[in-house]
Amino acid sequence: MKPSLLRYQTTHSLFLSVPGPRHSYFICRPFLQSLMSKRNPDTSEKEHFASRSPQIRKMSEPTAATTIQLTPQEERLKSLLLEVARHVDETQGWRDAVILRWAGGWVRDKLLGIQSHDIDTAINVTTGAHFSAEIAALCKNPEMVKKHGVTSTDIGNLHKIAANPEKSKHLETTTIKLFDFDVDFVNLRKETYSGDSRNPQVEFGTAEEDALRRDATVNALFYNLNTGKVEDFTGGLADMGNKLIKTPLDPLQTFMDDPLRVLRLIRFASRLQFTIDPDAEKMMGNSKVLQALRLKISRERVGMEVEKMLKGEHSKDALERIDTLGLYHTVFMDPGSSNAPHPDISNWRTVYECLDRLRKGRTPGSIYDVLVHTEEAAYFSWVLAAVVPWAPFSREAPTVGKEPPPYATLAAKEGIKAPNKVCEVIITMHGKTSQTPALSISKAITPSS
């Protein structure tokens, strides 16, 4: 081990356990988220939606400053979807022409030169389930199959993800596998909140209204399949150029509408190595936002965001943002335990910084290289680093029955829905620390360390 890392072992050392051919341990500072009426294609979205609701704000013209170069597979997908849209136009008799837009993360990544196989498709006049059903039906048509070269492996089954308003999942989405892309379909929408209601009124909306309800401006860009242009209603192109994560609306409103956006912004800022807008940062630790994150969002959704953070290339940055923004006790906690202790995180920085140094200093035969052999093991190590502040606390064993899991395990299992394998490693670590005094394992990380 490099001399610069030895200082992390002098006091309060804890085990980092990672799975491999066998569970291994090494000493290191860490313990270690009704169909709309058809309108004439010449009718603008602004006119159409203004006629539907007097409360809809005036639609501004989108900035279309750039185009996107599609790969051959993306061109195939675009061609097929536009063919389906034309078929819907000809057969449904609606007054509106179908306009398709690829939205959000795919647009952002393409502009950054990152290839993505997850594509969100927003539709202006019908639901995702209806449009997906049209795709599935038409792909059984011999003429369509021949024209677009559709094989049996090019199209998968439809999967519906139901709406769950109580957990801030406000609209049903439909996913289908097409040409090796996971394509989600959903209608453009707006969300209106009234009073203290936790659940919005969701209805069809314009492209701008859909962009404004999103978590970040860089995720609110559209690629219009009909025009081949990028549409920017929120200043996302400029923010991308400035490497800035910024909310389309007032940050407090954005976070209160869906508190999971706090974690999503951290994930995107870490992954892209962007800066979070200072106004947004101020609101991310707001007590109302944190309370809403605890109560409104399922721990499964929280866990999904954290898992993506810790499996990324910048796990340390993600944990550092959670730390500095005051989110630790909201994320890594058991929401079902009202009398759990309050871990001290004043020295937690030492943990994730040490693990990051070990990872970056990896060489053949180094401690990290010897013990972390897989991506799964790397993810496990970051989960362990995340729950280190819980290490000092043990739960009282009952006089009869099975010994309860330690608080650190509950923080992982119930807080972020970590896999059972991770939780088993945490339990094993606690057993080893109590059984191996020769290794000078400390029971606490305190300010005096």
Image (spheres, grey):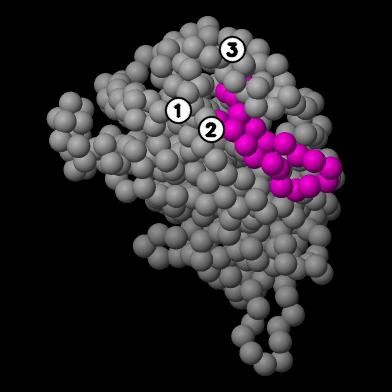
Quarter residue 371 falls in: bottom left
Residue depicted at x 61% and y 47% = 169
- Residue 239 in view here: no
Three-letter amino acid code at the position of disc 3: Pro
Residue 201 left/right relative to 369: right
Q: Residues within 10 Å of mark 2 (few under 14, many from 20)?
A: some
Q: Position of residue 356 (x, y in %)?
A: 57, 41
Q: Is residue 238 left or right of residue 11?
A: left
User: Which comes sooner in the sequence, label 1 or label 3?
Assistant: 3
| In the image, farthest residue toward the bottom | 400
Q: Position of residue 166 (x, y in %)?
A: 67, 54
Among the 4 quarters of the image, the one containing residue 113: top left
Was residue 162 drawn as part of the magenta stretch in this picture?
Answer: no
Which region of the structure is painted magenta?
188-210
Query: Who comes first in sequence, dot 3 or dot 2?
Result: 2
Please, is residue 354 above or below residue 111 in the view? below
- Which-is-in-front pick, marks 1 and 3? 1
Which residue is identified by label 2? 36
Q: Secondary structure at mark 2?
A: loop
Q: Earlier in the sequence, mark 2 or mark 1?
A: 2
Mark 1 vs 3: CB contact within 8 A: no
Query: Residue 438 location, x and y as percent?
Result: 62, 69
Residue type (three-letter) at the residue carrying disc 1: Trp
- Which of the two residues, 229 or 186, is positioned nearer the viewer here? 186
Label 3: how many Cα within 10 Å (few below 14, some 14–19, many 20+) = some
From this viewpoint, is residue 141 visible? yes
Give the residue type at disc 2.
Met
Q: Mark 3 highlights which residue?
A: 62
* Closest to the observer, 168 or 26: 168
Tell me the residue that label 1 is attached to. 94
